Amino acid sequence: MEGPKPVSAAQGSASRNPDETEANTRKLLEAARRGDLEETLKLAAAERGAIRAEVMTYWRGRALHIALTFGHLHIVDKLVQLMSPNDLELATDSNTVLCSAVLNKDENFNISAAKCIVAKHDRLLTLPTPYYWIPVTWAVELGHNELARYLYSVTPFHVLRPENGKYGADLLVRCYYSKMFDVAVDLLRRCPRLAMRNQGQGAGDNLLLTLAKAPSSSLDQIRFPSWKRWFYERIHVHLAHEFNLDEVVNPVAEVNDSIRDNYARSAGSDVAVDLARDCPKLAMRDQGAGDKSQFPSWKRWLYERLLLGLVGNIDNLLGIKKIREAKLGHQQYLALLRATCRGVTPLNDKEIQESGIRNAIFEAAKRGNAVFIVEALKVHFTLYAIHDEKRRRIFSLAVEYRQANVYNLIHGLSAKPFLSTSIDYFGNSMLHTT
């Protein structure tokens, strides 16, 4: 059976008066909202211009936008076939049809709808939407991870390069905030300059500044009580997906509840695994106990319901789950930070100046982000002596903003006497700022 033919933009509704055209358009939008395929196709064929028309009803938009909003995939599929590529670029409130697909909360639906739309007109992948974001950035922002990975895989990479606008830099920052580290690391691997792109006045921070402004409380285990620090230092974060970024890796925890549940049933919990590794005698004693399958059924029931359940809840009882998540976040942060810092050539003064790494170090000093400063100086050690427009150096800023963890870094530098006695533009030393 031959499918519906696209409606040309030249085809209109001149044969009808405006009131009748608007009435038919409203009927079409209502049919699309209800998911009535037969009525939708009938009205679209009777009133050629209605499929492109935008009418203010309870739901502002065109028929395809309405079908996408209410999740009617069968309507979406037919309307996409009927519309020309130019029709698909028509926006409602700056939202293209691909953006409307992304905004739907049902990820199974929005992936299918996005594939249908992209197959017809892939240029929509590169058309900006509200906030000047392209669809993949919106998918990341809204937490539609699988949709975001699909859109990232089909978005032309040249669009994301820094010389072609802020799309790639924005996507990189949103990936960091949304914890989509696989996409973020891939972006850095393919184009390290994205992390340092100058976003312009009022356009938001690039990844370098975003990492510098990360709260020090989320990166420093010293803020934990002593017993939690003990657990923090000994808990092992599972690493996976090593990338071609020297030592940079992408650490991941158990990615979903089903994996976590299976892991708990088979091994008791992550705590049990760590104890078995750190205390071999415990593991040997467990092995000597034999397989639980030799127990009578009622003992197996008790073993599975009580013992494993108790051990599995140790994480929550002691707060170990939060400690593990904190360490995981720290490792992920380090992976991106190291990849970002390696993207700046240490011996290229012009590149260092344009990258904004100096300003990022100053921001880190003001916020107590010693981790950022340490990793930046590992790659660009000479930056320890930089100063801002008021000739304040890193450690002067640390004193002024009361960031002891940053100031303490001075004790490991041979230039400590020089740095501790330096004065700013107004002739003030560190002593004046305390």
Image (cartoon, grey):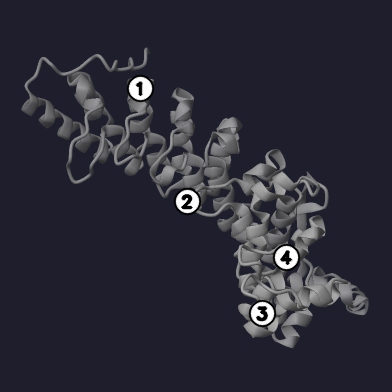
The mark that comes first in sequence, 2 or 3, is 2
Identify the mark at residue 86; answer none if there is no mark. 1
State left or right for residue 73 relative to residue 281.
Answer: left
- Farthest front residue in view: 427
Residue 307 makes an appearance in the image:
no
Q: Residue at x 54, y 52 (%)?
A: 174
Amino acid of disc 3:
Val
Pointer 3 residue = 399
Question: CB atoms at circles 3 and 1 under 8 Å apart?
Answer: no
Mark 1, other Cα within 10 Å: few <14 / some 14–19 / many ≥20: few
Secondary element type, mark 2: loop
CA distance for labels 2 and 3: 29 Å
Q: Position of residue 344 (x, y in %)?
A: 74, 47
Q: Which quarter of the figure is the C terminus placed in?
A: bottom right
Amino acid of disc 2:
Gln
Question: CB atoms at circles 2 and 3 under 8 Å apart?
Answer: no
CA distance for labels 1 and 4: 50 Å
Which of the pair 424/397 is nearer the observer? 424
Secondary element type, mark 1: helix
Question: CB atoms at circles 1 and 2 under 8 Å apart?
Answer: no
The mark that comes first in sequence, 1 or 4, is 1
Pointer 2 residue = 201
Q: Position of residue 119 (x, y in %)?
A: 48, 25
Which of the pair 214/284 is nearer the observer? 214
The quarter holding residue 239 reads: bottom right
Q: Position of residue 24 (x, y in %)?
A: 14, 28
Mark 2, other Cα within 10 Å: few <14 / some 14–19 / many ≥20: few
